[in-house]
Image (spheres, helix red, strand yellow):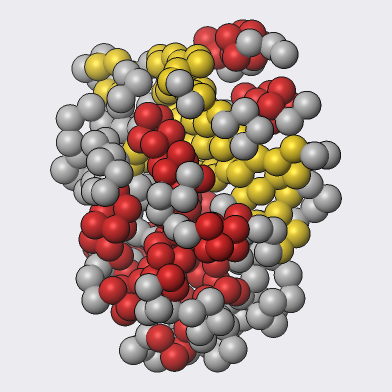
Amino acid sequence: MQSIQELWNQWDGAPAFSGVFSVRDENGIVFQTSAGYRNQSEQLPNTPDTAFGIASGTKLLTGVSVCKLIEAGKLHLDDKIWDILPYDLGQIDRSVTLRHLLTHTSGIGDYLDEDADDFDAVAAALAAKYPLYLWERLAYYLPMITPLPKKFAPGERFSYCNAGYILLGLAIEAAAQVSYQQYVSDAILAPLKLKHTGFYRMDQLPANTALGYTEDGKTNHFKLPIIGGADGGLYTCASDMDTLWRALMNGNILSTAMLDSFLMPHVRQDDERSYGLGVYRLDRGEHVAFYVVGVDVGVGFVSIYFPRRKHTATIVTNTEQNIFPLSKLLFQEELA
């Protein structure tokens, strides 16, 4: 087995890295490094405890939250979203269930369709019509979603869908009678005492939080919603992700039966990759890994749990750098 230090040295992106790379086992840190600046103009360095935006990595918390409310009897996996929400959902198919939304098999139109050839232009036009500084409440997203035609019949196939997770966040709000962000904070973050994790406003970031930077060196303040929602935008650090993974996998958040359902492959993407109820799964031979990813303007995030060695690995950056080659090296080593 190679050391994680050797894997890090193999990655040609290491010299330019701005962020944190951390691998831990049950006894603590196996390898950890931080580099670059959380604030480039003031040259404030990234540290192991720096909080970074994780974009779609937030979907892990959304999936877990839905599962907690299912366990509490307030939601059911096959509930139809039309029956849960007190809104006119327009073009959304009336047969779409929470299961469809969790597994990206709903077929609903996506306000930010990552399959679109002109994605950047679509995103720019959307932000011009709906100013990003107003993206505070999940209900604000509905006019961007409900007029869209469906892409395919519910359950037909996998198609990554941010809009589906916005609807899940609204379902959480309907069941819990508090905002999505408040529910996640009260039900998951606070009990685990995650000190550097939260839905921080981009115009009110706490100390030791990384600013995200675009390729031209500007911050991403005018490129992302003012506060994170159910499809992305949480801030966290590497040690908090380790705590979260271990609490989840040790049965401290969900029951054994619910955790099994959360992790099982509900929909296949290819021979190795599948998706559960808010988490990716990679099966390679007899070994498995669970992971979440997030990519946005000035945000890069991968966090993985390897059950065989009970390792967690988190890579997070506040630049436009491609960190996936490093995660590929980790998969190759841990699943060999």
Numbered circles on residues, count: 0
Instruction: Using the rendered view, name the quadrant where residue 168 is placed.
Output: bottom left
Which x, y percent locates residue 245? 47, 41
Residue 327 vs residue 239: left or right?
right
Which x, y percent locates residue 176? 28, 74
Residue 99 vs residue 68: left or right?
right
**Residue at the spot x=56%, y=29% of the render?**
311
Which x, y percent locates residue 286? 80, 39
Image: 107 above or below 42:
below
Image: 279 above or below 303:
below
**Residue at the spot x=16%, y=43% of the render?**
204
Residue 185 visible? The answer is yes
**Residue at the spot x=37%, y=73% of the render?**
72
Residue 110 visible? The answer is no
Image: 323 above or below 122:
above
- Quarter the C terminus occupies: top right
